[in-house]
Image (spheres, grey):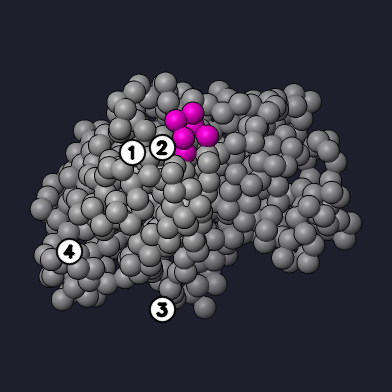
């Protein structure tokens, strides 16, 4: 038996998985985000631990025999957060989360101090990453920075609380801007640019390696026969990839969730940070991945639903079963700024080419197509960075819409695979890593791909029309960015 823990921003999800990789049970406990100032986003790490304990308590109560047989625990976690500890392991301040934007200016400071940062870390410095946050703390909370002796990411802190060990995995460490991603080791130059040293960092392990054991009091609390081994584990996207079986070079998937991700597993480090493409270590040894991110994917349809006062299903019901032609309307889905390829948190979205004859259905289709075009931007960024995506699985809430997946397939020009029902999320991937850490099995034996429900191929009759629409979409960003700049000066 194995437990997978997914420490998300909105909640902690825990799954209990048996030896046949069946999810026997799942528990989720909600979390709240504190926003004390504009652009700030924080959580209390103690709340993560309380939620995790409550979730496992519930599983142990409902499945006492199965929980008693758990031999491994894996973690999946929200990335980039900064948990600062003093010499006694005490948390010095609330965790600054991945979606906190206060450290915008500190990104330029970091890259000025470490000019090779993009080549070494594989990423552009962004305020969501960990290193700029520490520069901000050093400037604005000098006493706290002076007391800091250890910096942990969220899931590493949860491991620390449950095992007493300060250990981080390669995939999550890649999102700090402190990792030499190609060499899979901490970069002393990157740390120095932040006013830190190797002594402030946890030990590094691969995600499938053993990395600590559960504390005796928790073993007793849950009636376990012996102390389960913790896996090195993974950041949330890498854990999701493990759950999908995307562990071999060339494996690719799209995540059509609140935000959007285009992921491809690579056989080597492909850095340089071109077009805001991320280059991270994977959670399993010997492979890396590249990833493009769009910030408002399914969130765009949810926004349009709120604006129209109609349910998403009602809006989609006004559209054809499959795309017949691109909408005459264009939509830029920059509702929260954009990551790939623009790295612009200030730009905002909008509709274009509206007329007196524009219908709600045309605007709904434009929302779906605008998100698809933003995925195309990410795909083109990956290609420019050396990764060719020839086919991909598609996951996330938006994948339930066959029309949206069909639009995506035609815009991207690649076959997309919708998956059969089954658990493939971060918690499940974490449980798979726990099994690998306990048994030492081959990754390919454990990390199998889920069954495909259907494959949707591009509509060749629409290829030229969608190429023209995409070219039009590409003209929107410069204009919207210019408008934002002009208004900011007034």
- Mark 4 and mark 1: span between their CA atoms? 27 Å
- Would residue 18 be counted in the magenta stretch? yes
State the residue at coordinates (18%, 73%).
144
Looking at the image, which residue sits at the far right?
357
Position of residue 412 measured from the top left corner of the image (x, y, whole percent): 62, 32
Image position of 112 (left or right of 325) = left
**Dot 3 corresponds to which residue?**
36
The reply to whether dot 2 and dot 1 touch (C-beta < 8 Å) is: yes
- Mark 2 and mark 1: span between their CA atoms? 6 Å
- Mark 4 and mark 2: span between their CA atoms? 31 Å
Q: Quadrant of the N terminus?
A: top left
**Dot 2 corresponds to which residue?**
1
**Dot 1 corresponds to which residue?**
71
**Dot 4 corresponds to which residue?**
89
The reply to whether dot 4 and dot 1 touch (C-beta < 8 Å) is: no
Element carrying mark 3: loop
Which image quadrant for residue 276? top left
Front tag of 4 and 2: 2
Dot 4 or dot 1, earlier in sequence: 1
Dot 4 or dot 3, earlier in sequence: 3
| Highlighted magenta segment, given as a residue range | 17-22
The reply to whether dot 2 and dot 3 touch (C-beta < 8 Å) is: no
Does residue 389 lie above or below 141 as drawn? above
Q: Is residue 289 visible?
A: yes
Dot 1 or dot 3, earlier in sequence: 3
- Mark 2 and mark 3: span between their CA atoms? 41 Å
Dot 2 or dot 3, earlier in sequence: 2
């Amino acid at each position: 038996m194995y437990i997978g823990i997914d420490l998300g921003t909105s909640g902690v999800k825990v799954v209990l998985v048996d030896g046949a990789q069946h999810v026997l049970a799942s528990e989720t406990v909600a979390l709240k985000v504190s926003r004390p100032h504009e652009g700030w986003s924080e959580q209390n790490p103690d709340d993560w631990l309380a939620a995790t304990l409550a979730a496992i308590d519930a599983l142990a109560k409902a499945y006492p025999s199965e929980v008693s047989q758990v031999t491994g625990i894996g973690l999946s976690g929200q990335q980039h957060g900064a948990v600062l500890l003093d010499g006694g392991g005490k948390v010095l301040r609330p965790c600054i989360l991945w979606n906190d934007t206060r450290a915008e200016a500190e990104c330029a400071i970091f890259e000025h101090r470490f000019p090779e940062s993009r080549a070494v870390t594989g990423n552009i410095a962004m305020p969501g990453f960990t290193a700029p946050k520490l520069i901000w703390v050093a400037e604005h909370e000098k006493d706290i920075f002076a007391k800091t002796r250890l910096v942990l990411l969220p899931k590493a802190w949860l491991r620390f609380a449950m095992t007493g060990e300060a250990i981080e995995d390669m995939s999550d460490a890649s999102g700090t801007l402190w990792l030499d991603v190609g060499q899979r080791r901490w970069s002393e130059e990157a740390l120095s640019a932040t006013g830190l040293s190797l002594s402030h960092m946890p030990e590094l392990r691969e995600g499938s390696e053993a990395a600590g054991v559960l504390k005796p009091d928790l073993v007793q609390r849950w009636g376990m026969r012996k102390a389960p081994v913790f896996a090195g584990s993974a950041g949330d996207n890498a854990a999701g990839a493990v759950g999908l079986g995307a562990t071999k070079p060339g494996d690719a998937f799209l995540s059509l969730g609140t935000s959007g991700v285009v992921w491809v597993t690579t056989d080597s480090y492909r850095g340089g940070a071109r077009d805001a493409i991320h280059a991270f270590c994977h959670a399993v040894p010997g492979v890396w991945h590249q990833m493009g991110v769009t910030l408002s994917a399914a969130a765009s349809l949810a926004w349009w639903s709120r604006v129209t006062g109609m349910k998403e299903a009602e809006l989609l019901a006004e559209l054809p079963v499959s795309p017949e032609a691109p909408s005459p309307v264009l939509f830029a889905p920059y509702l929260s700024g954009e990551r790939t390829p623009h790295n612009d948190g200030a730009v905002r979205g909008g509709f274009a080419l509206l007329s007196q004859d524009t219908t709600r259905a045309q605007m709904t289709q434009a929302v779906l197509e605008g998100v698809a075009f933003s995925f195309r931007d990410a795909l083109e960024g990956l290609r420019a960075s050396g990764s060719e995506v020839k086919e991909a699985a598609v996951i996330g809430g938006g994948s339930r819409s066959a029309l949206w997946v069909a639009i995506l397939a035609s815009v991207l020009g690649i076959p997309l695979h919708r998956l059969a029902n089954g658990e493939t999320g971060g918690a499940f991937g974490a449980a798979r890593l726990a099994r690998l850490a306990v048994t030492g099995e081959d990754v390919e034996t454990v990390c199998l791909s889920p069954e495909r429900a259907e494959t949707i191929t591009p509509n060749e009759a629409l290829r030229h029309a969608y190429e023209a629409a995409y070219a039009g979409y590409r003209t929107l960003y410069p204009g919207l960015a210019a408008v934002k700049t002009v208004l900011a000066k007034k």
